[in-house]
C-alpha cells in the first residue's frame, strides 16, 4: 500500500494505537520525529486526535452504506474511517482529494473490488452532514444507543454515566469528551511574570480560567505561542492542577510525598508553591522525565523509583499525595484512545488497586497526617465510592473536603480529589 505523506503516517500511528495498544501521544512523538514541516506535523496530529475523538460517529455513518463492515480488513476500515473524518469534519480539504487517496491506497493494497466499494461509500458519505443528529436517530434507537453513536463513545461507558449521573449531565460530559481540552499552563517564573502574561492574555480575550500560578487559554496557537515567548512555563492540564489547588496544598503538613508522581506535573506545582516535596513513581521512565524537569527548573526535589504499595521511605510522611492509576474516563478529550481500549473489567482492576494504595497510605500516615487522593476519571466507584469505603473501614480518618471539576467551566476534562486527615488519639476520642 502506497499512501503518501501525512495520511500514511497518521494511519501508522492509528493502527499502532488501535491494534497494538500503543499510547497515542507516545506513538505520535515517535513518528513525528521523521516529519520535517510544521504543516504536516499539524495535519498528522489533527487527523489522529480528530479521528479517535469521532471514530464512533464516523463508523456509524459508514455502516449505513456498508454490508457487514466488520468483515472488512482492519486496515481498509481504518482508511475509510480516516477519509471519512476528512470528508465530514475537515472543511479545508477538498472532498475529491480525500476520496482519491483512500481509493488509490485500497486499490494498491487490496485490489480493485474493495477500491470500487470504497469509492462508492465515500462519495455517499461526502454528501452527509456529520453534525446532523437526525442521521443517528433514523431507526428510533434508545437514548443510550443514540448517545453512543452521536458522541462517539462505547455504549458501556454511556450506560455507566447515565446510571451514575443522569441524562443531562451525561450529555454534557459526552459533548466535552469530543472537544479539544483547554490548554493548561503553569508559569514557573515569578508571580510578576504571571501577572504580565495574565494582562496580555486578557487583552486578547483568550483566558478561559486562571488561578495563580496556572492559567487555561483558548485561542489561535500562533497567538498563544507568541505570548509565551521568553516565559518559563510548563504545559500541564489546568483541571489536573486545579484539583490540587482546590484542596489547599499550602496547609498540608510537610514534607509531602507525591507517591505516584508520573512525570512530575503535580510535584512541580507543589514546588512552585514553595512546598517541600518528595517524589516517586513505579516506572523508571517517568522518573527519568521527572529528573529532566527537575534540571530544567533548577529544583532540588528528592525522587526515587518506588511503589506506593511498598514504600521505601525511612520516615512516615505527614502528607501523602496519591494521584492514582485510574480508568481515565475524565480525560477522554485529551486521550481519546482511552475509550476504545478500556473494557468494563479494567474498572474493577483499577478500583482494587486504588483500594490497596489507599489502605497502605492510611497505615503509613502519622497522627495529624493528611492523605490526598486524586483521579482523572468519571466513575463513582473510583471516586466517591473509594472515599466512602475507606472512611467506613478506617475510623481514624476524617474527610476534610472533596472536589470535582465544574462542568460549566468548559475545560473539557474532569478530575476528582479528596483530602483526608488522620485524627490523633485525643481528637478521635472526642
Image (spheres, grey):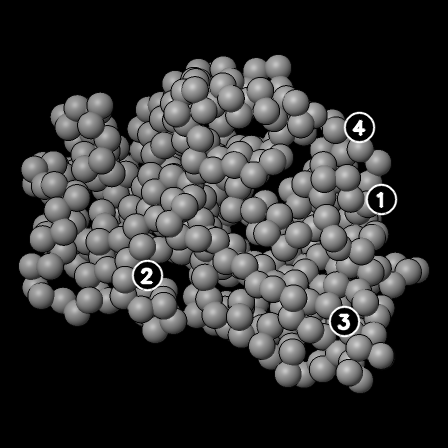
Residue occupying image coordinates x 80% and y 84%: 429
State the residue in front, 263 or 79.
263
Separation (CA) of disc 4 from disc 2: 43 Å
Residue carrying label 4: 298
Tags 4 and 3 touching, CB below 8 Å = no
Residue carrying label 1: 302
Dividing the picture into quadrants, the one containing residue 354 is: bottom right
Residue 422 shows which numbered tag? 3
Camera-near label (2 vs 3) is 3
Separation (CA) of disc 2 from disc 1: 42 Å
- Which mark sits nearer the N-terminus, 2 or 1? 2
Task: Tell me where residue 60 appears, x and y as whole percent.
Answer: 19, 53
Separation (CA) of disc 4 from disc 1: 13 Å
Residue 276 visible at all: yes
Residue 169 shows which numbered tag? 2
Residue occupying image coordinates x 75% and y 63%: 370
Task: Tell me where residue 152 appears, x and y as whole percent.
Answer: 28, 53
Tags 4 and 1 touching, CB below 8 Å = no
Amino acid at each position: 500500500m502506497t499512501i503518501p505523506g501525512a495520511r500514511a503516517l497518521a494511519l501508522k500511528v492509528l493502527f499502532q494505537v488501535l491494534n497494538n495498544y500503543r499510547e497515542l501521544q507516545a506513538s505520535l512523538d515517535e513518528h513525528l520525529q521523521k516529519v520535517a514541516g510544521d504543516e504536516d506535523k499539524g495535519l498528522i496530529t489533527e487527523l489522529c486526535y480528530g479521528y479517535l475523538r469521532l471514530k464512533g460517529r464516523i463508523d456509524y455513518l459508514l455502516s449505513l452504506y456498508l454490508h457487514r463492515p466488520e468483515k472488512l480488513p482492519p486496515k481498509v476500515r481504518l482508511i475509510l474511517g480516516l477519509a471519512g473524518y476528512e470528508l465530514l469534519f475537515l472543511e479545508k480539504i477538498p472532498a475529491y482529494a480525500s476520496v482519491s487517496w483512500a481509493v488509490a491506497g485500497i486499490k494498491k493494497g487490496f485490489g480493485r473490488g474493495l477500491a470500487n466499494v470504497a469509492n462508492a461509500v465515500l462519495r455517499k458519505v461526502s454528501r452527509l452532514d456529520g453534525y446532523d443528529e437526525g442521521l443517528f436517530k433514523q431507526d428510533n434507537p434508545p437514548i443510550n444507543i443514540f448517545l453512543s453513536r452521536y458522541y462517539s463513545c462505547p455504549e458501556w461507558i454511556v450506560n455507566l454515566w447515565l446510571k451514575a449521573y443522569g441524562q443531562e449531565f451525561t450529555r454534557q460530559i459526552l459533548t466535552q469528551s469530543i472537544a479539544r481540552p483547554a490548554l493548561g499552563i503553569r508559569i514557573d517564573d515569578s508571580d510578576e511574570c504571571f501577572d504580565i502574561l495574565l494582562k496580555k492574555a486578557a487583552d486578547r480575550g483568550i483566558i478561559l480560567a486562571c488561578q495563580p500560578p496556572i492559567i487555561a487559554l483558548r485561542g489561535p496557537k500562533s497567538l498563544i505561542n507568541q505570548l509565551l515567548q521568553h516565559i518559563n512555563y510548563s504545559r500541564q492540564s489546568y483541571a489536573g492542577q486545579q484539583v490540587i489547588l482546590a484542596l489547599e496544598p499550602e496547609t498540608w503538613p510537610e514534607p509531602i510525598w507525591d507517591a505516584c508522581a508520573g512525570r512530575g506535573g503535580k510535584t512541580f506545582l507543589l514546588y512552585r508553591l514553595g512546598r517541600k516535596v518528595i517524589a516517586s513513581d513505579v516506572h523508571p521512565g517517568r522518573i527519568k522525565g521527572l529528573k529532566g524537569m527537575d534540571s530544567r527548573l533548577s529544583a532540588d526535589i528528592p525522587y526515587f523509583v518506588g511503589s506506593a504499595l511498598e514504600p521505601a521511605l525511612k520516615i512516615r510522611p505527614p502528607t501523602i499525595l496519591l494521584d492514582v492509576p485510574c480508568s481515565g474516563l475524565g480525560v477522554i478529550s485529551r486521550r481519546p484512545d482511552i475509550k476504545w481500549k478500556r473494557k468494563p473489567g479494567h474498572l474493577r482492576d483499577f478500583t482494587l488497586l486504588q483500594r490497596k494504595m489507599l489502605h497502605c497510605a492510611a497505615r503509613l500516615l502519622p497522627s495529624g497526617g493528611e492523605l490526598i487522593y486524586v483521579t482523572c476519571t468519571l466513575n463513582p466507584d473510583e471516586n466517591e465510592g473509594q472515599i466512602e469505603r475507606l472512611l467506613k473501614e478506617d475510623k481514624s480518618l476524617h474527610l476534610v473536603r472533596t472536589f470535582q471539576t465544574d462542568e460549566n467551566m468548559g475545560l473539557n476534562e474532569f478530575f476528582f480529589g479528596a483530602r483526608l486527615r488522620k485524627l490523633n488519639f485525643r481528637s478521635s476520642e472526642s
